[in-house]
C-alpha cells in the first residue's frame, strides 16, 4: 500500500506542486493550508510522513512540532523553510523533533530523496 | 468537374465577389487586411492566410518582440485570399506577422510560439489567442501520462487534467492568454509545445486576485515582469517562477531595490505564481497594428 504524506503549507505554490509531484511518485498525499487543524487531521487520517512549513498563516511550524511529536512520536516530520532560512530555526526544529529539513527552492528530486530516506522507500 | 464541385465553385465565386465589394467599395474605403488560418507545420514552416483585396500591393512584416518589425516579403495580392508560408520559421522560437497593404495595417497580428518542456514540470502559458483555446485543440498530442493543472484560487487547489490513452480527461478545459498551468512531461526527453493564433491587442485587462494564483502576460513578450510587462506589483507580493531545467522554484519577494538589480524575468509562453497582498488589475495598452 502506498505511503501517505501530509503536506502542510499555507503557500499554494509549494503545497500544490509537492502534492502533484509526490502523487506522481506513487505516494498518497494529503494537504492542509493551515496549522490549526493539523492535530485533528492526524487523528482522522494518519500519515507516514509530514512536510511542515515554518511560517503558516495561523501557526508556527516549529511550535507545532511539539504537540505533533507528542501525539505521534515516531512520525517523521520534515520542516520546510522558505526564503528566510536560518540556523536558529534549524536548531529549534531539531530540538522539537524534526527529522529533516527542506528549502522551498530546492530541486524536487532532492525533496524526493529526503522523503525516500525517511520512509525507507 | 462534378456538378457539386461546380456548384461549390460558383457559390465561392459569388461569395468572393460580395466580400470584395464590401471590402473595397461599399464605403469607398479599403478595409484593413486580416490574417488568420494559422498552422505550424511539424517540420518547421509557419503558414497563414491573408485576406486583403486582389491586386493589393503588400508588405509582410515579421517581429520577435512586437516592437521591431522587418519586411520579409513584398508583392501584389494574387487574390482576395491567399496563403503565405514562412519557411524560415524553424529558425525562431516565436515570431509574429503583420501586413501593410497600400498604407493600411492588417487588423490583427498572428504568430506562433514554441515552449520547450524538459522532463518533469513546467509552468506554461498560451501566449496567443487561438480560434479554439481548449486543451484538446491547443495540445492535441502529448505523451500518455502528461498532466495539466490550473489553480483554482477560490477552491484553493489545482484542477486535475491528464492525457491518457490518446485523449484528455477533460478536453474542454481552456487555457487562454493571461492564464497559466503546470504541465508535466512524463518522458525522459525534451518536448516542444507549439501555440499559434492572434496577438491580443487593445486595452488589455486581467484581474489578479489577492492571495495566490497562476498567471501570465496577456501579450507574447518576454521581459522584466514589472518594468517591461507592466505587472502591478506592491510591497509584500511574492513571485514564484519555476526553473524548469533545475526543477525548482525561484522565489522573489518584491523589494524595489532588489528587483531593480535582479528583476523576475518571464519568457514567452511562461506562467508564474503570484502571491498578492491585495487584488490588483494588470492593465496594458497594447497596439502594434496602428
Image: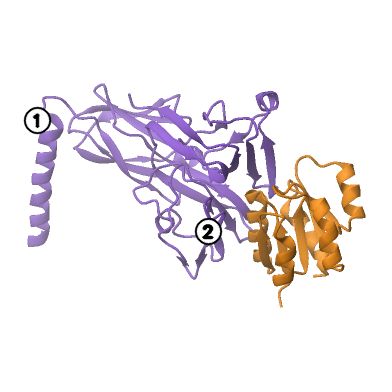
- Is the residue marked by circle 2 packed among few (<14), some (14-19), or many (20+) residues within 10 Å? some
Residue depicted at x 8% and y 50%: B10
Q: Nearer the viewer, residue B1 or B278?
A: B278
Q: Quadrant of residue A77?
A: bottom right
Q: Nearer the viewer, residue B106 or A41?
A: A41
Residue extending furthest toward the bottom: A1
Q: Is residue A59 left or right of residue B220?
A: right
Q: Nearer the viewer, residue A99 or A67?
A: A67
Tag 2 or tag 1, which sits nearer the N-term?
1
- Residue at 72% x, 63% y is A6
C-alpha distance separating marks 1 and 2: 50 Å
The answer to whether residue B119 is visible is no
Give the numbered dot on residue B159: 2
Chain label for disc 1: B
Side of B38 relative to B188 (left or right): left
Q: Are marks 1 and 2 on the same chain?
A: yes
Q: Give the tally of numbered discs.
A: 2
Q: Position of residue A47 (x, y in %)?
A: 74, 69
Residue B6 visible in rendering: yes
Chain ID for orange: A
Q: Which chain is purple?
A: B
Q: Tell me, yes or no, whether the two marked residues, 1 and 2, touch with CB atoms within 8 Å.
A: no
Query: Which quadrant holds the C terminus of chain B?
Result: top left
Image coordinates of residue B265 in percent, x first then y, are: 61, 34
**Mark 1: secondary structure:** loop
Judge by depth and name the residue closer to the eye, B65 or B124: B124
Q: Which residue is mark 1?
A: B26
Residue B77 screen position, x and y as percent: 22, 33
Amino acid at each position: 500500500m502506498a505511503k501517505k504524506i501530509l503536506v502542510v503549507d499555507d503557500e499554494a505554490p509549494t503545497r500544490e506542486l509537492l502534492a502533484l509531484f509526490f502523487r506522481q511518485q506513487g505516494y498518497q498525499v494529503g494537504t492542509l493550508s493551515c496549522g490549526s487543524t493539523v492535530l485533528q487531521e492526524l487523528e482522522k487520517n494518519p500519515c507516514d510522513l509530514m512536510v511542515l512549513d515554518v511560517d503558516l498563516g495561523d501557526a508556527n511550524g516549529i511550535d507545532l512540532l511539539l504537540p505533533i511529536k507528542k501525539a505521534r512520536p515516531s512520525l517523521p516530520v520534515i520542516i520546510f523553510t522558505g526564503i528566510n532560512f536560518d540556523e536558529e530555526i534549524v536548531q529549534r526544529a531539531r530540538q522539537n523533533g524534526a527529522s529533516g529539513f527542506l528549502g522551498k527552492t530546492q530541486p524536487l528530486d532532492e525533496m524526493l530523496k529526503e522523503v525516500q530516506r525517511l520512509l525507507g522507500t | 468537374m462534378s456538378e457539386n464541385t461546380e456548384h461549390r465553385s460558383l457559390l465561392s465565386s459569388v461569395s468572393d465577389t460580395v466580400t470584395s465589394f464590401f471590402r473595397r467599395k461599399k464605403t469607398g474605403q479599403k478595409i484593413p487586411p486580416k490574417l488568420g488560418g494559422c498552422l505550424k507545420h511539424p517540420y518547421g514552416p509557419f503558414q497563414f492566410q491573408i485576406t486583403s483585396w486582389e491586386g493589393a500591393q503588400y508588405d509582410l512584416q515579421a517581429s520577435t518582440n512586437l516592437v521591431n518589425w522587418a519586411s520579409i516579403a513584398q508583392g501584389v495580392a494574387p487574390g482576395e485570399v491567399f496563403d503565405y508560408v514562412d519557411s524560415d520559421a524553424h529558425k525562431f522560437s516565436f515570431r509574429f506577422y503583420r501586413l501593410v497593404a497600400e498604407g493600411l495595417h492588417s487588423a490583427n497580428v498572428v504568430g506562433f510560439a514554441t515552449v520547450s518542456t524538459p522532463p518533469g514540470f513546467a509552468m506554461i502559458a498560451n501566449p496567443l489567442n487561438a480560434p479554439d483555446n481548449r486543451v484538446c485543440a491547443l495540445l492535441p498530442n502529448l505523451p500518455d501520462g502528461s498532466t495539466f493543472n490550473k489553480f483554482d484560487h477560490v477552491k484553493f487547489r489545482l484542477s486535475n487534467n491528464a492525457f491518457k490513452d490518446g485523449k484528455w480527461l477533460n478536453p474542454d478545459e481552456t487555457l487562454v492568454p493571461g492564464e497559466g498551468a503546470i504541465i508535466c512531461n512524463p518522458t525522459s526527453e525534451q518536448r516542444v509545445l507549439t501555440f499559434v493564433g492572434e496577438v491580443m491587442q487593445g486595452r488589455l485587462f486581467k484581474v489578479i486576485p489577492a492571495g495566490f494564483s497562476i498567471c501570465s502576460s496577456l501579450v507574447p513578450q518576454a521581459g522584466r515582469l514589472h518594468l517591461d510587462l507592466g505587472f502591478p506589483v506592491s510591497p509584500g507580493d511574492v513571485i514564484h517562477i519555476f526553473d524548469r531545467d533545475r526543477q525548482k522554484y525561484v522565489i522573489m519577494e518584491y523589494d524595489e531595490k532588489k528587483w531593480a538589480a535582479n528583476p523576475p524575468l518571464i519568457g514567452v509562453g511562461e506562467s508564474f505564481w503570484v502571491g498578492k497582498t491585495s487584488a490588483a488589475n494588470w492593465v496594458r495598452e497594447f497596439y502594434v497594428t496602428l
